Image (cartoon, rainbow, N blue to C red):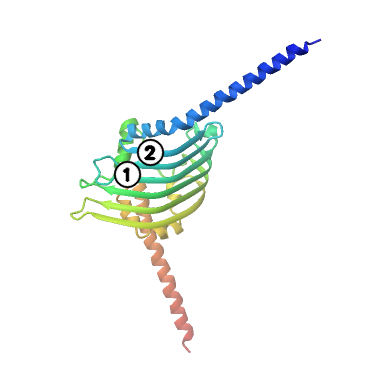
Amino acid sequence: MRDPITAENHGGALAKLFVFLVIVFAFVAVAWMLFLPTLVTHQIRDQSGFDASITRLAANPFTGSVELRGFVLANPPTFPESDFLDIREFRARGSVRSLLSDHPIFDDMLVDVATVTLVKRSDGTTNADAFNRNIQAHDGSNLVPKTPSSRNFLIRHLEVRVDRLIIADYSLRQPAHREFSLHLDQSYKDVTAIDQLLAPSVLKNLAPVAAAISGLLPGDLGKVFGQAAGSSKDLFREAGERVKGFFDALEESKKP
């Protein structure tokens, strides 16, 4: 027969071990949350030369979820303006196994951008191009996909919000500084390429700035916006022709 006192001692020891493990995991979780933003911003500075700060960053490797708030990317001192990117919130949740593969799959993603500031220096170099080039030089990668249509990733549900776009061009004799209120709020399904983000409703809002953006973004991303500018002109021309055709038809119907 089992000694009840011994059983009680074993139960107490297990309870103490459980409490100890909970405390250890709590400390690990807190340390992870405290030091992760520092590690990420340090990597960004080291690889790109651009300064970065994060208000809050939480990542759960067991569920494949990431939450980021208050991400600010600043230009190096070689640029006449410091602002580059201000992201209010970024959230993503995906398959853990796929995130470790060459074909990551995200179930949902939110990108909420307060401000994008594209700056061109007097020598014609833009902050977006410098950031991408520095990353390439550091590890041989390219942040801008060479083939936007290639199926390297999948985002089942994506929400993109962009409030403001600022364009500062110091390559001109008289520097130009323009600000646009975009107020983009777009949802997408099954995203596998950058050009899918330029839906007709987005093109309509970007029509005034698409041509200017195309000259400030590197690689194929700039080409995509250049194509968007051309597409938007076609869309408005087609819409104008339809309106004209409608009124012409009315005029014809009024004739005896």
CA gap, disc 1 and disc 2: 18 Å
Q: Nearer the viewer, mark 1 or mark 2?
A: 2
Q: Against 234, is 36 above or below? A: above
Check the picture and name the quadrant holding the N terminus.
top right
Badge 2 crowding class, 10 Å Cα cut-off, few under 14, some 14 to 19, many 20 or more, is some
Residue positioned most to the left: 173
Question: Dot 2 lies on which element?
Answer: strand
Q: Against 8, is 66 above or below? A: below
Position in image of residue 139 (x %, y %)? 34, 30
Position in image of residue 137 (x %, y %)? 30, 33
Position in image of residue 246 (x %, y %)? 46, 75
Q: Against 81, is 212 above or below? A: below
Q: Residue at x 41, y 54 (%)?
A: 163
Label of residue 53 in the image: 2
Position in image of residue 156 (x %, y %)? 54, 45
Determine which residue is flagged by label 1.
128
Classify residue 54 as left or right of residue 20: left
Residue positioned most to the right: 1
Callout 1 amino acid? Ala
Location of residue 164 by image quarter: bottom left
Callout 2 amino acid? Ser
Location of residue 75 by image quarter: top left
Q: Earlier in the sequence, mark 1 or mark 2?
A: 2
Residue positioned most to the bottom: 256
Q: Residue at x 50, y 30 (%)?
A: 30
Decide which of 100, 34 is in the foreground and name it.
34
Decide which of 137, 39 is in the foreground and name it.
39
Q: Residue at x 53, y 35 (%)?
A: 64
